[in-house]
Image (cartoon, helix red, strand yellow):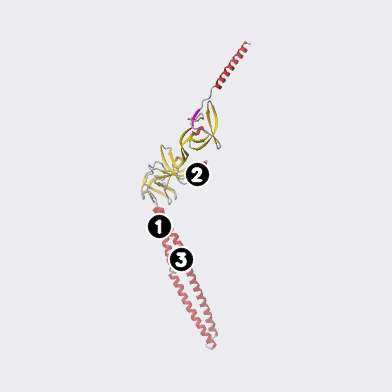
């Protein structure tokens, strides 16, 4: 019985202490971080990422399948126009060139023969045979006319007339056959000229292509620049179209910036661009935007416009194909009211702040202007010197 009464007393004391602590806690105001509305200069920026590209690269690719014999150049070094970079084994393509030249010579000889009327011996034979046949026909024709008169005068027999008539018919048939053969020969010569002319033209193109392939076995620099890519080594086997080398003047480069679709409306040619690279965190490169993107494309999980930016790279520190950070200055305002982005609550198209009023916070709608990664321009709703609350994990 005494134990039960003791437990009741302990419980009442605990309740009294808890109530006292709760009351004291309610009377003590909460602590919040705050910031003030101030005038400052504000630049509206778009931040994204991009890739470095040479403006006018020279890309060298293999013109034929084969082994790399020798690599003379060194990746990353400057080269002059005409300087030898590497050589390829052209044994196979040289053999093809010699065969193609021999075939072209034979086709050109056939074409010359066709252009002069065909094979001279065949044409002479047909012409001679036709001339003899026509002479024989004409002779028999005159004899036939004479025999007709003689038979009428009983100076020749009808049998002689019939035999001459039969011989005349055979002579006429022979002459017609030879004339047609000569015409067919001449027609075929004309067709052969067209066919051979096409064949010679094709073979000439083939010889030219093979000669260019042989010449390409010595890979030289087409212009002065930096050899920023040299992916092949001695004894590598490469296929037609494989990359052999890339070079460009790296003092003038551009950055292909990937701008998210909602931010494309703020872009215009000539805007100031700042480029940073994680590999050189203390360096900043500047440039200007060029043409505004005309379409949106998929880039990973993003829908972006690809914006080209010209960048000065005098020290050639930025390397092609590196990923860089981009900041594009959309607009700039001098001496405007600003607040940190952390102090502004965004709800759809509306913006709110929590204004400090004594020991209370009052929610107030504001009108915002331009913005950047850290600040909003304030065009209405609060005044200079007003104090607004910051979230607990934000710095003033």
Report the span colored magenta.
33-37
Is residue 123 among what the camera can see? yes
Task: Reply above or below: 145 against 244.
Answer: below
**Camera-nearest label, 1 or 3:** 3
Q: Residues within 10 Å of mark 2 (few under 14, many from 20)?
A: many
The residue that label 3 is drawn on is 193
Q: Main secondary structure of the magenta part?
A: strand
**Camera-nearest label, 3 or 2:** 2
The residue that label 1 is drawn on is 98
Task: Reply above or below: 103 against 51.
Answer: below
What element does badge 3 sit on? helix
Q: Nearest the camera: 92 or 391?
A: 391
Locate residue 211, reporting x and y percent: 40, 56
Locate residue 19, reporting x and y percent: 58, 19
> Distance from label 1 to label 3 (Cα)?
25 Å
What element does badge 1 sit on? helix
Is residue 374 among what the camera can see? no
Residue at position x 42%, y 61% from top?
A: 104
Tag 1 near tag 3, CB within 8 Å: no
Q: Nearest the camera: 92 or 383?
A: 383
Locate residue 338, reporting x and y percent: 48, 34
The residue that label 2 is drawn on is 305
> Distance from label 3 to label 2 (Cα)?
57 Å
Residue at position x 46%, y 34% from top?
A: 39
Residue 189: in magenta span: no
Q: Tell me which label, 1 or 2, sits earlier in the chain.
A: 1
State which quarter of the image contains the N terminus: top right
Image position of 1 (left or right of 276): right
Q: Tell me which label, 1 or 3, sits earlier in the chain.
A: 1
Task: Reply above or below: 189 against 337.
Answer: below
Locate residue 122, reporting x and y percent: 45, 70
């Amino acid at each position: 019985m005494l134990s039960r009464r003791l437990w009741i007393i302990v419980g009442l004391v605990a309740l009294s202490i808890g109530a006292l602590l709760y009351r004291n806690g309610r009377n003590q105001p909460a602590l919040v971080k705050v910031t003030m509305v101030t005038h400052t200069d504000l630049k509206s920026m778009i931040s994204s990422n991009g890739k470095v590209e040479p403006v006018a690269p020279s890309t060298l690719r293999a013109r034929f399948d084969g082994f790399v014999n020798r690599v003379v150049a060194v990746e990353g070094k400057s080269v002059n126009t005409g300087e030898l970079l590497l050589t390829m084994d052209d044994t196979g393509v040289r053999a093809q060139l010699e065969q193609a030249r021999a075939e072209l010579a034979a086709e050109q000889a056939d074409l010359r023969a066709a252009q002069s009327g065909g094979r001279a011996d065949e044409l002479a034979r047909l012409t001679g045979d036709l001339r003899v046949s026509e002479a024989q026909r004409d002779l028999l024709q005159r004899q036939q006319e004479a025999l007709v008169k003689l038979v009428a005068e009983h100076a020749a027999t009808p049998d002689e007339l019939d035999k001459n008539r039969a011989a005349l018919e055979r002579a006429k048939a022979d002459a017609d056959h030879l004339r047609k053969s000569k015409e067919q020969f001449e027609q075929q010569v004309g067709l052969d000229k067209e066919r051979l002319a096409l064949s010679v033209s094709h073979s000439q193109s083939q010889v030219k292509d093979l000669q260019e392939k042989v010449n390409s076995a010595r890979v030289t620099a087409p212009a002065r620049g930096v050899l920023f890519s040299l992916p092949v080594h001695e004894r590598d086997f490469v296929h037609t179209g494989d990359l052999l080398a890339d070079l460009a003047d790296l003092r003038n480069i551009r950055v292909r910036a990937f701008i998210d679709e909602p931010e494309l409306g703020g872009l215009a040619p000539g805007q100031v661009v700042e480029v940073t690279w994680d590999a050189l965190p203390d360096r900043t490169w500047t440039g200007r935007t060029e043409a505004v993107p005309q379409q949106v494309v998929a880039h990973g999980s993003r829908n972006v416009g690809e914006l080209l930016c010209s960048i000065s790279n005098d020290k050639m520190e930025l390397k092609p194909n590196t990923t860089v950070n981009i900041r594009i200055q959309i607009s700039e305002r001098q001496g405007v009211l600003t607040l940190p982005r952390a102090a502004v609550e965004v709800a759809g198209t509306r913006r709110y702040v929590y204004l400090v009023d004594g020991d209370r916070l009052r929610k107030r709608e504001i009108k915002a202007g331009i913005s950047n990664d850290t600040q909003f321009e304030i065009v209405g709703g609060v005044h200079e010197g007003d104090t607004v609350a910051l979230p607990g994990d934000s710095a003033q």
